Amino acid sequence: MRRVFWRLIPFLFLLYVCAYLDRVNLSFAALSMRRDLGFSGTVYGAGAGLFFISYALFEIPANLVLLRLGPRRWIAIIMVAWGFLSTSMALIHSPATFYLARFLLGAAEAGFFPGIILCLTRWFPIAQRARAFALFITAAPVSGVIGAPLSTLLLRLDGIAHIAGWKWLFLGEGLPSILLGITVFFVITDRPEEAPWLSPSERQWLITEVDAHSHHAAATHLSHAFRSTTVWLLSSIYFAMSVGLYALSLWLPIVIKGITHASDLRVIGLTTIPYALAAVAMLLVARSSDRSRERKWHLCGCLVAAALGFVASAIPATPALSLAAIFFCTAGVWSGLGPFWSLPTYILRGTAAAAGIAFINSVGAVGGFTGPYIMGIASDLTHSFRAALLVTGLVLVLAALVACRLKAPQRL
């Protein structure tokens, strides 16, 4: 398992850093881009969230194509595609081109995350999946830690070759996805039985371990995924989590600037703090969840913590307390992802797993549109984010109540 870990997780981690950065680098560009293009909060929020509409529409078809082509070929294709689309964000000049670029980027990325989750279920036994998922997903908050200084450097290129700094940002951060997409062909192996870097006895042992709990996964066919009550409950929970995740991810620099009134570059530097806290919290919660083999109550605790952070951030307070609340809710909402993704991969396998994971992620993508859009409307109507933060906190409270009702096994 150590060899499997070092072969897969660091490389997949790097891929997801690029994927997530291409998805949310808009938030770093927004501070200057909105001024240059004259975008209102509603236009920015709609464009930021539009990514998730196409992401939701193409999620299930993309994951079914992955079953046909295999992760190696499919991930390589879509990474190169979204790398080119991410760099094309430098060409936007109006709300219409902004909306189109974000829509196409969402369509290109649709198959990546659920495809990797499905791929990891082939390589990690059930008892080790929360940590495997968390280590992979930790790339998302880490992309914020990496993206902040990288974006700062690219924004400092403002005016070179008569190109705005935010355009340099999209060009510089889209190129790595294209290059890494090409390397996927040479690094990823689709299944354990195809791994030349494992001995025959190691391959057989791993296949046996991964299949040891497959009898628990009663849902194997496409229709089973949509008839499962647990899948629908998990979808509603993930919708709420995505509202919180992307309300923060795509508005965090703007929210921090509103609290601190600091310079643009200082604000981008401050965004590294909540992302670093989120990465640490994810790993600690996943480790606890795997050690105890308990998922449900770990997830509930994270949702409650995130909800409290959002509600606290909506209450008028000193800048220091408001920032602390924002940092706390960021760690809370991210840390629930490891235990969460262990649940659907336990009850689903085969085509049902591909469709079910994609469906859950699709519903989450709708939440990814909803969160940023609510933040944009609140910004334009009230010139504050407090109403949107409060609503997000209440949505997460409802998600925690739904999680308490899950009938999925508590000990996996």
Image: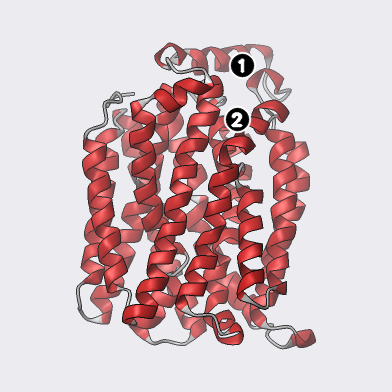
Q: Residues within 10 Å of mark 2 (few under 14, many from 20)?
A: few
Q: Residues within 10 Å of mark 1 (few under 14, many from 20)?
A: some
Residue 179's label in the rendered image is: none
Establish if 137 lies above or below 63: below
| Quarter occupied by residue 200 | top right
Name the element at disc 2.
Answer: helix
Give percent across and percent down for residue 98: 63, 70
Give percent across and percent down for residue 327: 33, 65
Decide: marks 1, 2 in contact (CB < 8 A)? yes
Residue wearing tag 1: 202
The residue closer to the viewer here, 390 or 80, is 390
Residue at x 47%, y 66% (from the top left corner): 250
The residue closer to the viewer here, 310 or 278, is 310
In which quadrant of the rendered image does the N terminus lie?
Answer: top right
Instruction: Give how far apart the Cα atoms at labels 1 and 2 are.
Output: 10 Å
Query: Horizontal placement of 273 versus 153: left or right?
Result: left
| Quarter occupied by residue 275 | bottom left
Residue wearing tag 2: 3
Establish if 355 lies above or below 165: above
Asked whether residue 275 appears in the rendered view, the answer is no
Query: Horizontal placement of 155 versus 384: left or right?
Result: right
In which quadrant of the rendered image does the C terminus lie?
Answer: top left
Q: Mark 1 belongs to which amino acid? A: Glu
